[in-house]
Image (cartoon, helix red, strand yellow):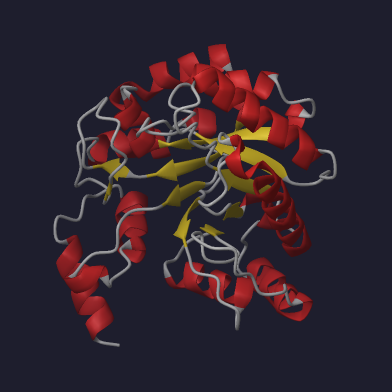
Amino acid sequence: MELLIGSHVSFNKKTQMLGSVLEALSYKANTFMFYTGAPQNTTRVEINDDITLQAKSKMLENNIDINKVVVHAPYIINLANSKNEQFNIEFLTQEIKRVSKLGIKNLVLHPGSHVGLGVETGINNIAFCLNKVLEENNDVNICLETMAGKGTEIGRSFEEIKSIIDKVDNSDKIKVCLDTCHLNDAGYDVSNFEQVLDEFDKIIGLEKIAVVHINDSKNKIGSNKDRHENIGYGTIGFDNMLKIIYNSRIKDVPKILETPYIGVDDKYPPYLFEIEMIRNKKFNDKLMDSCSSYYKKD
């Protein structure tokens, strides 16, 4: 099977998912991930079915499997803190309906931060909200993302993710998104990715992995900081990233880049060139020059 590799792309009110598909194709990607609106607020435009049909047609033309395309839930949803419980349930439910209308199967969600309530209470709050949300949801999976452990984040360990899954009634609708930077920053040695997968399989089960976020890290292992770096430019390193990306045990899982934009004012997306070096298995030590010269010509 061909490597499933893509990146985070934009979604705007005018071109919606069609614009997302076209951006992904410009990076020579065969999958992608997007937010259906700004991740920091509740502003959302109505899904245009005509544009969605155009997007699906463009995906078919270019052999992009919509079942491998991913949506990311907004950051403002925090299921671990019961303070805004009703908002969290209602907004996540609305987001799921939008994802379903687009025909996407997997929605990535940060488990949330307990903000001083404690890990056990945070996990119980997450499970309570997920049970409410999944009462009405039949066709979208919630993919809980592994987190770096910054502050009071839940999901810094496979055990915490497992505890959430065990408390959800419709647990078959709960999947997992592995994030390589987050794993590293949480203390997992991703340079020995086979061992990490063994541990995940023992605790949760490899069949639960639906998405992998491919990010190098600016930080040392166990730093709990969550600062993404471009592929091969961080502490994980290019060779280790390739071993993760090409691991046969997750070959059918979409790999999504969320690495930083580069150049002056961080204006250049690196994804065309990162995907190129991943496919060629050859590190580009002049990534900034490549991006600058390519995008300046436009």
Front-most of 287 and 136?
A: 136
State whether residue 31 appears in this view: no
235 sits to left or right of 45: left
Front-most of 232 and 177?
A: 177
Q: Is residue 242 above or below residue 123?
A: below
Front-most of 239 and 263?
A: 263
Relative image position of residue 28 (x, y in whole percent): 44, 66
Location of residue 232 (image quadrant):
top left
| Residue at 65 percent of width and 71 percent of height | 61
Quick one: quadrant of the C terminus? bottom left
Quick one: quadrant of the N terminus? top right
145 sits to left or right of 105: left
Relative image position of residue 72 (x, y in whole percent): 56, 52
| Residue at 47 percent of width and 56 percent of height | 6
Front-most of 201 and 107?
A: 107
Q: Is residue 188 above or below residue 44?
A: above
